[in-house]
Amino acid sequence: MSFPATGMAPAEILSALQRFKMADLDWQHGRVWAYVYQPDAAATDLMQQAYLHYLTENCLDPTTFPSTAHLEQEVVRMVADLLGGDEETCGNVTSGGTESILLAVKTARDWARHQRPGIDQPEMVLSRTAHAAFHKAAHYLGVKPVVVDFDPLTFAADVAAMRAAINERTIMLVASAPSYAQGALDPVADIAALAQEYGLLCHVDACVGGMYLPFLRQLGREIPPFDLSVPGVTSLSVDLHKYGYAAKGASVILYRHRALRRYQLFASTDTTAYTVINPTVLSSRSAGPLAAAWALLRYLGAVGYRQIVAVVQDATDRLIAGIAAIPDLQVLGQPVMSMVAVASPTINVFQLADAMRRRGWYVQPQLSAPHSPRNIHFSVSYGVAGYVDALLADLAACVAEVRHWPPVDRNLVEMAVRSLTVDHSPSAVQQLWQAIGLAEGRLPTDMALINEVLDALPDAIANELVIDVFNALF
């Protein structure tokens, strides 16, 4: 596509945008059970107005736009109050959970450089169920992730395994509240106590649970302590654009006190340009997501969030009960909230995801790992809660269909594994791409074969394959 020589009419531009979206799955009618977290129409309209109100303002310089700093401080204070903070608690609004986690790991690394200068290769200990954002942060920041096993029944972190992994290079322990994949709440109090015992930092990833579990507790569910009220928890991340239902681009990173948050900050007077002070990874930041998040928190309040959580948890309970009634399926672990993973001992769940997609549903395939079989994931949110019965009906029908599908071609899978682990020549890779349906420059509609290949490969090689595919197609 060449750069346009002349401009297009506004109506033509908007029509083109709408045309592009025709290839997307229908999230507006409860068909996408991941990625999208949508409140009701009134809340959405308010967020859009608030976002547009701050479309141009830049959070880079709070002395130029002091209202953006005011909004950020109020959002942080509201979230801190919800999650066990006190007058010493501080933090920032970020673009998402990954950035919040990157900052938590960066803070831990720089804290260790100052407090434990003898560590040449810092390490953080985390369960295999922790989010990939920690591995991304480790990759970016030169921190080694020490991954330990989890309880195979509950999917909660194994504290004894974490203790065994601590050494003189350890700087931080990680707890999930809950984990994204199976909705398992780690024993945060035990992990935080272990961190205190060894003088380590403890980060709680509450990106999915931080705006859900407090209200679930208020509704009468038994939720163990997981937030800054727990002694030893030093930082916590929580996404406003997931179960806070804010517009995309809004998360919060909280610290117990400013002395720790200081290690997050970056400043530069080293150039010929203006003085830079960045509390987050980004320099220029749109104030739109911040304003939209502030507006939604003020609009819904605790009463509104309790009402949403009540609807979503009821839908989750009905989903779990409905899955239990389908003989070929089983829920993994004991989800503490609305994140549900479903495996099968009898059918191929990757094919089941494809069958559901043919009917217009998106459910998320998840590869196997030690003690965790391949599965499909459901994120139950307010926007899909009213479609549980329709989903379960199609899920049962798709299970019946997939029982009679031919299995994925094992010869192709074995050829792919051989090509990528033994003969990684360009010709072998090209032959592999043709065999698994990637030769035409786009992903196939059915992804079961590709997921089978990824599932059969060692993680390091599977990662390289995913990078190669993405790099070639997008």
Image: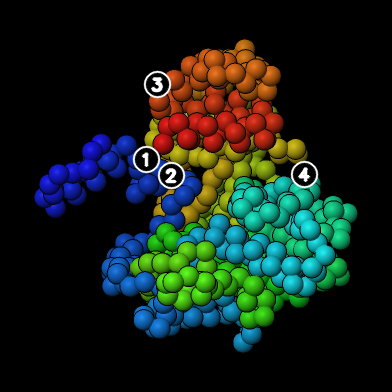
Residue type at mark 2 is Val
State the image coordinates of residue 251 (x, y, percent, origin top left).
Answer: 51, 65
Quadrant containing the N terminus in the rendered view? top left
Residue contact at pointers 2 and 1, CB within 8 angstroms: yes
Q: Select label 4 or label 3 by which is in front.
A: 3
State the image coordinates of residue 296 (x, y, percent, origin top left).
Answer: 40, 71
Looking at this view, is 314 or 94 the one in front? Answer: 94
Residue type at mark 4 is Pro
Mark 4 neighbour density, 10 Å: few (under 14) some (14–19) many (20 or more)? some
Left or right for 284, reference 84: left
Residue at x 12%, y 47% (from the top left corner): 6
Looking at this view, is 221 or 255 the one in front? Answer: 255
User: Of marks 2 and 4, which one's residue comes earlier in the chain?
Assistant: 2
Mark 1 neighbour density, 10 Å: few (under 14) some (14–19) many (20 or more)? some
Mark 2 neighbour density, 10 Å: few (under 14) some (14–19) many (20 or more)? many
Residue contact at pointers 2 and 3, CB within 8 angstroms: no
Residue at x 42%, y 64% (from the top left corner): 246
Q: Is residue 455 visible?
A: yes
Q: Which mark is residue 266?
A: none
Looking at this view, is 232 or 142 the one in front? Answer: 142
User: Of marks 4 and 3, which one's residue comes earlier in the chain?
Assistant: 4
Element type at marker 4?
Answer: loop
Q: Which mark is residue 152?
A: 4
Residue type at mark 1 is Leu
State the image coordinates of residue 79 (x, y, percent, origin top left).
Answer: 54, 75
Looking at this view, is 279 or 213 the one in front? Answer: 279
Element type at marker 3?
Answer: loop
Residue at x 40%, y 21% (from the top left corner): 440
Element type at marker 1?
Answer: loop
Q: Which mark is residue 32?
A: 2
**Residue pointed to by mark 3:** 440
